[in-house]
Image: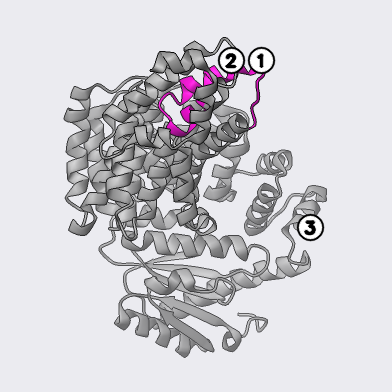
Amino acid sequence: MSSIIKLSNLTALVCFDNREKASQVKQMFMKAGVGNVDVINHEKLSSTSVSKYDVCVFEYSYDYVREVSGYVGKLKTNQFFKAYPVVILNLADLSNRIDYDSAKVLDVDHIITGLINYEQFRELLNKLLSIKQFYDKVYIGSKRKYELFAQSVTQYTAKIKSKQLINLALEALYKSGKKNEFIALYSQYDRAEISTFNVIRFSEICDDSQRSISALKWVLKKNDCLFLAHGRLADEYQALKNVEATSHHRQSAFECHPADEAAFNLLVECQIKQGKLDSLAPIITKRTLYIAKRFDDYLSLVITLFNAFMSAPYRLRPAQYKHYIEPIIRVVSKRIPLDKKDEFSALVKLLVAMYLYRDGKQLKARAMTLDIYHNVIRRKRKPTLLVVLTALRALAICGEAKLCGQIVNTINVSDISKRYPIQFQWAAAPYSQLQKTYQWLKQQTEQRDQLEKMATVMQRYPFSFDLNCLLLTILLDYKEGTKQYSLAIIKRLKRCNYVVRRLDIASEVNKSQSYIDALSKNESVAKAVA
């Protein structure tokens, strides 16, 4: 090996939960002459620097997929064209197909299965460090900027002979957003010279569906990166509206990588959209076997299930809910710790309430939402964030602006938006819309052309206490033509009082001085209410 890379200057990371194996790998590094070797377990991986190490060796099985994939993903992104870290995965002898398939997705330099002796390790290390040396040399030549490298590739007219350089050029063009240049370079070479990941990238940016599908089927024949290939094929067939092929590849992608949240979400959405409710129970059961056994993961699973039904083109009948969904909820509930079961039950009821709201049963949905919020969530000293976010969404859909404000004031919005970006956006979208509606109403004066917009607000939030009181205050200031609207709002407020338990809505209405003042000015409405 060239003297450019000095082993004594290298820093290695050994990540094993098994202390004996970790010690063996560390000793092999030290024997080979590597100067600095850090040993950690998987729990510490998320807080470990991605710019410190030249070589990383991970003990890998599907149980560690979240930790390892998260770290390797950050490593590949942050260090691209800065330095080339060598990544090795060590799988056990008894690794199954899911272990291997998920390991291939990570695009690492080498996968070791089982034990390895020192001679094999030294030979592998020399080989991988020579690859690192090649890439680092290219990085330095392009001033460690892949944009400059991509620009030079577009100006290079001769054929590139190095397979490594071809694939590096394709990756740089892809990351630079040079779509046409990527396709032009890709088309010059045989697929055998192009990495699986660049073939999949080609399928993402190629406008010709048949060429994309042909490339992805070639990946399947190689039996390489099956998860990514099936996922992309599902996307292609979905665009072509081929329902059966889409369903098949969604199922296959999930079977390859059942812990992947996106694959699970897309499969559940696909099966529910097609009405294949019988398939949900085995999918959920398999999902619970492979996800990390955390409360948040079970909550996310149930949220995904209900969200798919919310976007389904049909209405779920009560008998179908009892037959298909309740058994799934019971299966998941058995895995919930006893001290969390009340929160899990609250989450399910909030999701049911949102479904009922969409189904036209707004009064019942609002009653359920307020009941859960006041009698479960508010009484918890420190409720789970996902349950709080679900409550925020449910209250916003029902139009309860002030209660939503109370929730937002009690949570760290910036922290939650980073920790749960998807769930936060899911909860924040209806709240943002409600806030805009509330602020718009507060700015209204007696303008005849705004009545139609106000009628739309009444239809969207028919039983919102906050908006109804605000609407009533505005309408009662009108000289004429609003008596019917005003009486309808008062009638809805009275109906709310009959349904919601432990809440005295009538007394809340009476506290609204603006409502009382407006009512006293409008004699016709006041007499009708009396």
Q: Say whether marks 2 and 1 touch (CB < 8 Å).
A: yes
Q: Quadrant of the N terminus?
A: bottom right
- Which residue position holds label 3? 148
- Disc 1 is placed on an element classified as helix
| 469, 152: nearer the viewer | 469
Residue under the image location 52 percent in, 53 percent down: 417
Query: What whole-number distance in Å separates the C-alpha atoms at marks 2 and 3?
Result: 57 Å
Q: Earlier in the sequence, mark 3 or mark 1?
A: 3
* Vertical relation: 76 (above or below) 420: below
| 402, 306: nearer the viewer | 402
- Which residue position holds label 1? 449
The amino acid at mark 3 is Leu
| 381, 387: nearer the viewer | 381
Identify the magenta region.
443-472
Residue 139 place in picture, x, y as percent: 71, 66
| 114, 163: nearer the viewer | 114
Majority secondary structure in the magenta region: helix
